[in-house]
Image (cartoon, rainbow, N blue to C red):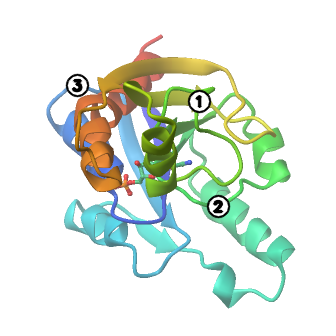
Amino acid sequence: MLKICVCVSGGGTNLQAIMDAIDNGTIRNAEIVRVISNNKSAFALERAKNHQIDAVAVSPKDFETREQFNDALLQAVKEKNPDLIVLAGFLVVIPEKMIAEYRGKIINIHPSLIPSFCGTGYYGLKVHEAALTRGVKVTGATVHYVDEGTDTGPIILQKAVEVLPGDTPKVLQQRVMEQAEWKILPQAIDMIANQ
Ligand code: GAR
């Protein structure tokens, strides 16, 4: 049984997709052992608790230095000894120590077809704003391994999504989530748990 730690910052719809996929058998041989949020008021924490999953907040606001926060974050992960760390809308730069300690065991979902609209500054709605400004006709989502760079690690899965006339960033974000993110993130976890 693959033990997963899911890191979140906001609404947690990708977390919900993972929990649902475990419940309905789309993800086999995996369990979530902890959900960690850097944001105490993230709705994702409620989603975890509603599912009887251990959920903790580790906020940078509670620490004097970034290093202390990074250590606390790593500690919160290590306590559960996970086999896989899933960044599901986690808007924190992963400490190098964690990347080194969990090399090849951290995956991230990004809401574009990498290498488009990725890297520093591209997160959440900003990604979709940039895609609409550039006028691309196809966008999508990517699941990739995490290395020291921002969105530079090996790609595991990608799925394309059409951009439609009249799309706003929010409308496009919702379509990318429904048609791509909520499918390929569970699919990638199932692949890793059963390889
Ligand atoms: C998702 O669209 C995810 O791809 C994105 O944040 C959103 C979180 O939504 N992640 C990034 O932009 C990472 N660079 P959620 O909290 O509802 O899952």
- Does residue 88 appear to the left or right of 68 in the view shown? left
Residue lying farthest to the top in this orientation: 195
Ligand 1 neighbours mark 2 (CB distance < 8 Å):
no
| Mark closer to the chain start, 1 or 2 | 2
Residue situated in front as seen by the camera: 170 or 110: 170
Residue 117, placed above or below residue 53? above
Circle on res. 195: none
x, y percentage for residue 193? 44, 22
Q: Give the quadrant of residue 154.
A: top right
Residue plotted at (69% across, 42% down): 119
Q: Amino acid at mark 2?
A: Val
Which residue is the site of mark 3? Answer: 26
Residue situated in front as seen by the camera: 175 or 104: 175
- Does residue 65 appear to the left or right of 180 in the view shown? right
Q: Amino acid at mark 3?
A: Thr
- Element at label 3: loop
Residue plotted at (22% across, 59% down): 51
- Element at label 1: loop
Q: Nearer the viewer, mark 1 or mark 2?
A: 1
x, y percentage for residue 97? 84, 51
Q: Are marks 1 and 2 in contact (CB under 8 Å)?
A: no
x, y percentage for residue 86? 51, 43
Circle on res. 116: 1
Q: Amino acid at mark 1?
A: Ser
| Mark closer to the chain start, 2 or 3 | 3
Residue plotted at (76% across, 49% down): 98
Q: Are marks 2 and 3 in contact (CB under 8 Å)?
A: no
Q: Give the quadrant of residue 160.
A: top left
Which residue is the site of mark 2? Answer: 92
